[in-house]
Amino acid sequence: MKTRRKRTQTALGYSNAHAKSGIAARLPAIETWPNQFKGYEITIEIPEYTAICPKTGQPDFGAIRLHYMPDKACLELKSLKLYIHAYRNLGIFYENAVNRILQDIVSSCRPVWAVVTGEFTARGGLSSRIEAKYPS
């Protein structure tokens, strides 16, 4: 079974370089500010996410939703906006982008919990919804 899967991936031209594209890219820091309260939730909607497919070079479009419970720090929105806009020219798969965004949010503000959801526009009749959670 593994041999067949490898042949299919090779036949389609996907490589480990494609799969890892964008994961370690340098992106702007997400700043925070000191949280004054406990036990509440924040939802941030980002309706205009854009990145580049690392395989085809075509643009990908979608919406990102951040839902988290802050602990000692909250995300600063202007720096978050600049961070998300940095994806515009980055080659990265949907799945990797959602997980990378979650990783960077957790590193920035150390929330009690967080969920990042990406809803990506249809391409070839298929749309995707990816969700990553912390803690997993």
Image (tube, rainbow, N blue to C red):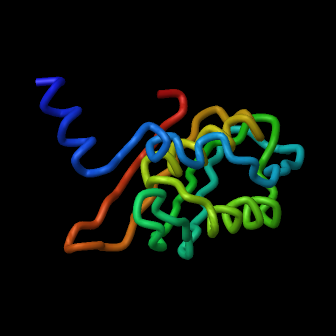
Whether 133 is drawn above or below 120: the answer is above
Residue ID at (83%, 44%): 35
Q: Is residue 84 left or right of residue 64?
A: right
Work out which residue is located at the far top of the displayed protein and give it. Answer: 2
Whether 128 is drawn above or below 7: the answer is below
Whether 132 is drawn above or below 4: the answer is below
Q: Is residue 61 visible?
A: no
Q: Is residue 75 visible?
A: yes
Work out which residue is located at the far right of the displayed protein and give it. Answer: 34
Q: Position of residue 105 (x, y in %)?
A: 68, 44
Q: Is residue 129 left or right of residue 37?
A: left
Residue ID at (81%, 35%): 72
Q: Nearer the viewer, residue 2 or 113?
A: 2
Q: Position of residue 54 (x, y in %)?
A: 48, 57
Whether 58 is drawn above or below 101: the answer is below
Q: Position of residue 20 (x, y in %)?
A: 51, 40
Q: Is residue 18 left or right of residue 21?
A: left
**Picture quadrant of residue 6:** top left
Q: Position of residue 23 (x, y in %)?
A: 59, 42
Q: Nearer the viewer, residue 121 or 11?
A: 11
Residue ID at (70%, 41%): 70
Report how many numbered discs are placed on residues in the image: 0
Q: Nearer the viewer, residue 128 or 52?
A: 52
Quadrant in which the N terminus appears? top left
Residue ID at (45%, 72%): 58
